[in-house]
Image (cartoon, rainbow, N blue to C red):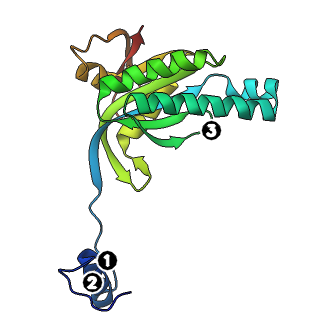
Amino acid sequence: MAGHDHLVFVGDGDRLVDEIQEFLTGSRSEQDVDRVLATVMFTDIVDSTRRAAELGDRQWRALLDRHDETVRQQLKRFRGSEVKNLGDGFMATFDGPARAVRCAAAISEAVRALGITVRSGLHTGEIELKRDDISGIAVHIAARVAAEAEAGETIVSSMVRDLVAGSGLRFEDRGARSLRGVPEEVRLYRVLA
């Protein structure tokens, strides 16, 4: 390790303890996973492959750049955190489900001016933070919820709908659905304008 001394109470004591543990036992202890409650949002451009073929690579790339800029503006406006750009969509997290729902609606409205239609899906649950990524069943559920959305729709799980009670947001019941890989049915709701 770099440095002149390695006092546990000065500097990076955790790293020093990890190094000593690995030297003595041959392995490091498992790090505690950082789990937080968050609302996960997925967005997706509808018919992106067809549009890319119509426009050609250069024009499609320019349109995608404008889409990405627009989405990032809305994420900033509603205090969302971009996790990943998925090529023709985004995965983002929010610390408040009402802001997430409003952000999804604002994205849908803003990209319409670009001649793009998006679909969005949201779910709230515990996620695992992994450096610049997230994981956990809540992420999978949010992705499956997004897959249930039609062009221009924002679909949310019952968890999101229940958490935003009193916010003034309105929803249409879409019924309980079996989502691929999810052990229990999830009740879905379409966000009304």
The foreground one among 90 and 127 is 90
Binning the other alpha carbons within 10 Å of mark 3 as few (below 14), some (14 to 19) or many (20 upward) gives: few
Q: Which quadrant would the C terminus be assigned to in this image?
A: top left
Mark 2, residue position: 21
**Residue 1 showing in the rendered view:** no
The foreground one among 76 and 174 is 76
Circle 1: residue type: Arg
**Residue 69, above or below 117:** below
| Image position of 58 (left or right of 130) | right
Separation (CA) of disc 3 from disc 2? 42 Å
Residue 100 in the image, given as x and y percentages of width and height: 37, 27
Earlier residue among tags 1 and 2: 2
State if disc 1 and disc 3 touch (CB < 8 Å).
no
Separation (CA) of disc 3 from disc 1? 37 Å
Q: Nearer the viewer, mark 3 or mark 1?
A: 3
Circle 3: residue type: Gly
Residue 72 in the image, given as x and y percentages of width and height: 51, 33
| Image position of 113 (left or right of 10) | right
Circle 2: residue type: Gln
Separation (CA) of disc 1 from disc 2? 6 Å
Mark 3, residue position: 87
State if disc 2 and disc 1 touch (CB < 8 Å).
yes
**Residue 105 showing in the rendered view:** yes
**Residue 164, above or below 44:** above
Binning the other alpha carbons within 10 Å of mark 1 as few (below 14), some (14 to 19) or many (20 upward) gives: some
Q: Residue at x 38, y 20 (%)?
A: 102
Disc number placed over residue 122 in the picture, else none:
none
**Residue 9, above or below 172:** below
Mark 1, residue position: 28
Earlier residue among tags 3 and 2: 2
Residue 52 in the image, given as x and y percentages of width and height: 75, 29
Q: Nearer the viewer, mark 3 or mark 2?
A: 3
